Image (cartoon, rainbow, N blue to C red):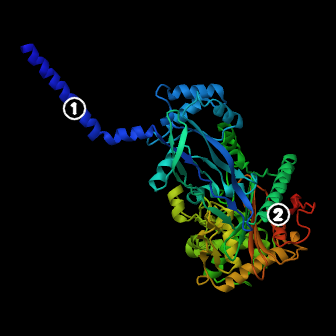
Amino acid sequence: MDRHKILRVVILVIIIILMSRAAYLQLARGDYYYQLSEGNRISVRPINAPRGRIYDRRGEIIVSNRLTYNLYLMQNEIPPDRSTKEILTKLSGLSSLAESRLISNYNNAEADTAVDPILLARHLSKEDMVIIAENKDILPGLLVKESSMRDYIYPTELVHATGYTGEISEQELISYNEAGYNYRGGDFVGKGGLEKEYEFYLNGERGAEQIEVNSRGQKIKTIGIKKPKPGSDLVLNIDFSLQSSVEKLLQENYQKLRELAAEDEERSMPTGIAAVVMDIDTGGILSSVSLPDYNLNLFAKGISSSDYQELVNDPLRPLINRTTMTAVPPGSIFKLVTGTAAMEELGVRANTTFYDSNGTFYIPNWSRPFRNWNPVGEGKLDFVKAIARSNNIVFYELGYELYKEYNGEKLAEYARKYGLGSKTGIDLPSEKSGLVPDDQWKRNQLNVGWYPGDSVNLSIGQGSLLTTPVQIASLISAVAAEGLAYKPQLVNKIINADGEIVKEFNPEINIDLRNQIDSNVFAALKQGMYDVVNKSYGTASRHFSDFPLTVAGKTGTAQTGASNHAWFGGFVPYDNPQIAVVVFIENGDSSAYSVPIAREIMKYYFGLKNHHNNNKKIYYYNREDDIE
């Protein structure tokens, strides 16, 4: 009898446990198991969105997309009796896809649910696509889906401005998603240039197809589709015809200078060259060239580690955009700033006279001489002629006088008025701000104060002063427009896939000195720049002797302790300035080598005959041509 009671109690307890478990599964965990069962029936397949294209100002496509195919793993379409590792191992054995890479991508994937696709490989070869299609029965859960990859139509032109894409990093993934965007591991994003600067416009919004599948993962029907949203297109201020010609011109001259340097040990070996052409009326960048560069299509599929290391370790630094990321002394172009400060603060006028007796300047009670680039004394010069001759002695004297009156602060103040020492705000990542040194900077960095020699050096654009070519283009524009310069801008507007303007970039004033600097100052500076190019004694006159347009400019040879950097900055036409042109040759020895390049750029821009494409290459590489 007792045994029957015990048995009934046991049975009752078992019934209670089973009923409790059933209630728990249906009530507490019902939604979970419903979704799990649905996951075995419903699959969500990705629809990739194309990245926005990039056009020049005339509508020519510079960067587009081309069709490619990616491989995904659909976890919920794998039969219970098969393991993911087994399938990936078999796939690797049949195809060219490395097992380690497949497993790594699988393990690092961040799928929120079992129905989310996992990206295993990009840009499948035709052979691998055929293998996967032919072996569907033994490779369940694999999905080949069309996608797009970057097509750099001109892969060796506009390289640094365009930039490139690459796989999103962990840090980017976190920061982008925290900012409210929807990125996943394995996505390609902009890594440099415009691709990075306008990532959130260029990047499209992926879509998805929700389908019903059978137990073998085969599609039964489409349940719903979320259409992808293509990325928006960039329309640039760049004139690609001009850009191509400037690139060709710089490449020819850069190679020629390097060849000559290899043959002559007295010449310095150029390590880079850059040019900027800017619309003075808007700040629009019409051309931006930096050499050496690289092939953008190396990055289209994802650059290999060996190729990337080769670029990184190249001593010529091809990944560096020298128009915005290289900051060096500007040499005598800075005399425009010194001249402005002298006229505003010391009462100097266009006809104020100076005297260079022997090509040397001494600070009182100092034994060190400061020398002119021309070792022979040039005698009597007025202020305008001092600019035209780029006479160091005159500007040494002005720098010293500014030091006596203001302890060097005024030179730094006027440099900053012209935008030096600050980023221009050009729409490119990693722009350098350069450096305008002053007493406070020197005390912070070197623990010593500002000496008269510092002002004397700074007066001719030497010492610790650092500028970029795009900053110099802004400086030239400000002088040409008599105190007004606009923010340098590569992108003119952004347009969505429906052709609607998403954003338009109107000219934005960066520098406005019209109420701070007297118009007579700009008149004197411009006259000096005119004489640089047009007077027989001007430092750039021999290169413009037969030029059909009236040009104004300023040469600059910046000493570095080893080799010199070569600069020329100018604007044209003189009476109605339209464009500013800056040419910079890193370790280029003398501005005599940058001037003829600027001239040819101007000739091409205005459609003049006998520009460099007419099989007439004009090189001025005789060492006796060296100028300041």
Task: Give the label on residue 177, or none.
Answer: none
Q: Identify whether 370 is placed above or below 291.
A: below
Task: Give the label on residue 19, or none.
Answer: 1
In the image shown, does 529 or 297 lie closer to the viewer? 297
Q: Identify whether 299 is placed above or below 355.
A: above
Q: Identify whether 449 is placed above or below 187.
A: below
Residue 351 visible to an observer of this rendering: yes
Badge 1 vs badge 2, beta-carbon distance below 8 Å: no
Q: Nearer the viewer, mark 1 or mark 2?
A: 1
Task: Give the label on residue 597, or none.
Answer: 2
Residue 375 visible to an observer of this rendering: no
Residue type at tag 2 = Ile
Residue type at tag 1 = Met
Quarter of image, res 617: bottom right
Q: Tell me which numbered mark, 1 or 2, is placed earlier along the sequence.
A: 1
Q: Identify whether 447 is placed above or below 507.
A: above
In the image shown, does 377 or 409 lie closer to the viewer? 409
395 to the left or right of 217? right
In the image shown, does 380 or 174 lie closer to the viewer? 174
46 to the left or right of 456? left
Task: Quarter of the image for the C terminus: give it.
Answer: bottom right
- Separation of residues labelled 1 and 2 (CA atoms): 89 Å
Tell me the crowding category of disc 1: few under 14, some 14 to 19, or many 20 or more residues within 10 angstroms, Cα based: few
Secondary structure type for disc 1: helix
Secondary structure type for disc 2: helix
In the image shown, does 457 or 320 lie closer to the viewer? 320
Q: Residue at x 61, y 74 (%)?
A: 506
